């Protein structure tokens, strides 16, 4: 009896992974014409087999479509399965107030959890928070440590930011940086409000 259950679980896992590969091909236009709607259907099917990466990709697609509630739903499901990028995605929703109120404390907590799960994007995001002192006490040393670690793990965004910080191109005027970020967030929120 246990052997039958194991075969079913493995069979579903294989189906989920196969559908994920098909979805990615359509999403990226790899070997087939790029078609986000077909990709989305395959991601949904893959997610029904418990594939956390498919769930995460659905969160990204729904975010692109401006459906932040559905995006958060899928990111939450993927995060329950230990997907670090999905946890980072949730942190970004708190950071930018997408589908939830802006909450920098929750954003930081999500980024820290995502880092534990191996997300280099979360390292970069938390590094930016420390660099600009946004939602946390400003700490250049901590930010550069995070950028460096993420860059060493292959994160191109972190590598670019680290290089800019090292040669002084990143504004050292934190007040101006914070003002620009707050202005951007305010405009983004106004645009979302106008769309609704």
Image (cartoon, grey):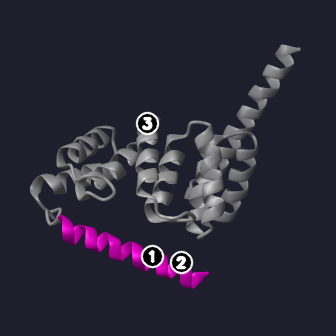
Disc 1 to disc 2: CB gap under 8 Å? yes
What's the distance in space between the residues labelled 3 and 2, CA to CA? Answer: 31 Å
Residue found 55% across the figure and 40% down from its top: 83
What's the distance in space between the residues labelled 3 and 1, CA to CA? Answer: 29 Å
Earlier-in-chain disc, 3 versus 2: 3
Residue 115 in the figure: left or right of residue 176:
right
Name the disc covering residue 188, or none.
Answer: 1
Judge whether residue 35 can be spotted in this image.
no
Residue 22 in the figure: left or right of residue 12:
left
Name the disc covering residue 118, or none.
Answer: 3
Residue found 83% across the figure and 15% down from its top: 3
In this rendering, the label closer to the viewer, 3 or 1: 1
Q: Which residues are magenta?
A: 174-196
Residue under label 2: 192
Label 1: few (<14), some (14–19) or many (≥20) C-alpha neighbours in 10 Å = some
Label 3: few (<14), some (14–19) or many (≥20) C-alpha neighbours in 10 Å = some
Q: Nearer the viewer, residue 47 or 181?
A: 181
In this rendering, the label closer to the viewer, 3 or 2: 2
Q: Nearer the viewer, residue 12 or 113?
A: 113
Tell me the SS state at disc 2. Answer: helix
The residue most toward the right is: 1
């Amino acid at each position: 009896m246990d052997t039958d259950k194991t075969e079913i679980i493995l069979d579903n896992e294989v189906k989920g992974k196969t559908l994920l590969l098909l979805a990615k091909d359509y999403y990226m236009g790899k070997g087939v014409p790029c078609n986000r709607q077909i990709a989305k259907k395959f991601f949904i099917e893959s997610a029904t087999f418990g594939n956390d990466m498919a769930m995460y990709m659905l969160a990204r697609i729904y975010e692109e479509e401006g459906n932040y509630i559905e995006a958060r739903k899928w990111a939450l499901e993927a995060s329950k399965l230990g997907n670090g990028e999905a946890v980072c995605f949730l942190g970004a929703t708190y950071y930018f107030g997408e589908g939830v109120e802006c909450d920098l404390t929750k954003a930081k907590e999500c980024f820290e959890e995502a880092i534990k799960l191996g997300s280099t994007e979360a390292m970069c995001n938390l590094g930016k928070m420390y660099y600009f002192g946004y939602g946390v006490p400003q700490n250049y040393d901590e930010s550069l440590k995070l950028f460096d670690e993420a860059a060493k793990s292959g994160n191109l965004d972190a590598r670019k930011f680290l290089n800019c910080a090292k040669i002084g191109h990143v504004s050292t005027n934190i007040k101006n940086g914070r003002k620009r970020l707050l202005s951007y967030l305010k405009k983004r929120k106004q645009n979302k409000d106008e769309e609704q």
